Amino acid sequence: MSFFTGKAANNGESVPERIIPAHVAIIMDGNGRWAKKRGMPRTFGHTQGARVAETILEDAADLGIRYLTLYAFSTENWSRPEAEVSALMNLLRKYMKTSLERCSRNNVRVRVIGDKSMLSKDLQESIEELEQATASNTRIGFQIAINYGGRDEIVRAIKRASQEGLLSDPSKIDDTVINDHLDTAGIPDPDLLIRTCGEQRISNFLLWQLAYSEFYFTDKAWPDFNKAELEKAIDAFNHRERRYGGLTV
């Protein structure tokens, strides 16, 4: 977790600045409902949601957040109407192709988590190009979850560890073995999970990593989410007491 330094109060005492969570994960919910309320197709909501995602990435970096993970497309989203799935894939395809220069200029490292083997070949190639081109960037780590499911990720992690022969001795299996083979290996667990549009569940997102995260739910639909809403979530986070299973000191 990252901290800002304190500042002097009027009485000479030190007043700590608010704590900025190092890693924020967001379930971007409500694009379709937002569009429907406006008499527009669901795809219009997804297009607006994609614009908001780009803005929030910059806002997060400006606030000092070190990692931002967005749930873009789940393993269950394939069951949506074909036209909607196609529109979502086209949005992702467009982002991968157009964001290279912007992410390089803004020092953003992009990583895609999820089972990429089910994505189209051209999208896989664009993802690989973007990941490689931004691998040395350091301002903020931007994780995009595509064809992602928390249970699927854990299964794939166990398979990878097994293929490396790391599960042959049960006495040597611990959480580090799993952590090191997750899609998020090398990335700290989220400090804060935000979900928009009033739903209060995690929907198979980062099941392993959210073990001790703080949750924040807002009724705002994702297309209406902005920097002020992000700061509200951070302010709420600052009123939480994180004990990680222990007692207050």
Image (cartoon, rainbow, N blue to C red):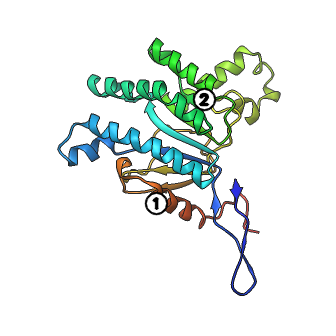
Does 52 sit left or right of 70 as displayed? left
The reply to whether residue 122 is in sight is: yes
Crowdedness of circle 1 by 10 Å Cα count: few (<14), some, many (20+)? few
Going 59% across and 67% down the picture, which residue do you hit?
239
Q: Nearer the viewer, residue 68 or 95?
A: 95
- Percent across and percent down for residue 18 are 63, 65
| Observer-nearest of 31 and 174 | 31
What amino acid is at disc 2?
Answer: Ile
Percent across and percent down for residue 220 are 37, 55
Q: Quadrant of residue 109?
A: top right
Q: Are marks 1 and 2 in contact (CB under 8 Å)?
A: no
The answer to whether residue 149 is seen in the rendering is no
Q: Secondary structure at mark 2?
A: helix
- Earlier-in-chain disc, 1 versus 2: 2
Residue nearer the viewer, 248 or 180: 180
Q: Using a 10 Å C-alpha cutoff, classify the residue at mark 2 as few (fewer than 14 neighbours), some (14 to 19) or many (20 or more).
A: some
Q: Quadrant of residue 14?
A: bottom right
* Closer mark to the observer between disc 1 and disc 2: 1
Q: Is residue 1 above or below residue 117?
A: below
Dot label at residue 228: 1
Quadrant in which the C terminus appears: bottom right
Query: Where residue 51 appears, x then y in whole percent?
Result: 39, 41
Q: Amino acid at mark 1?
A: Ala
Q: Residue at x 46, y 14 (%)?
A: 122
Task: Identify the element where label 1 is drawn.
Answer: helix
Determine which residue is flagged by label 2: 154
- Residue lying farthest to the top in this orientation: 121
Query: In the displayed structure, does residue 120 sit left or right of residue 7?
Result: left
* Residue 107 drawn at (x, y percent): 62, 38
Residue placed furthest toward the left: 39
Mark 1 and mark 2: span between their CA atoms?
34 Å
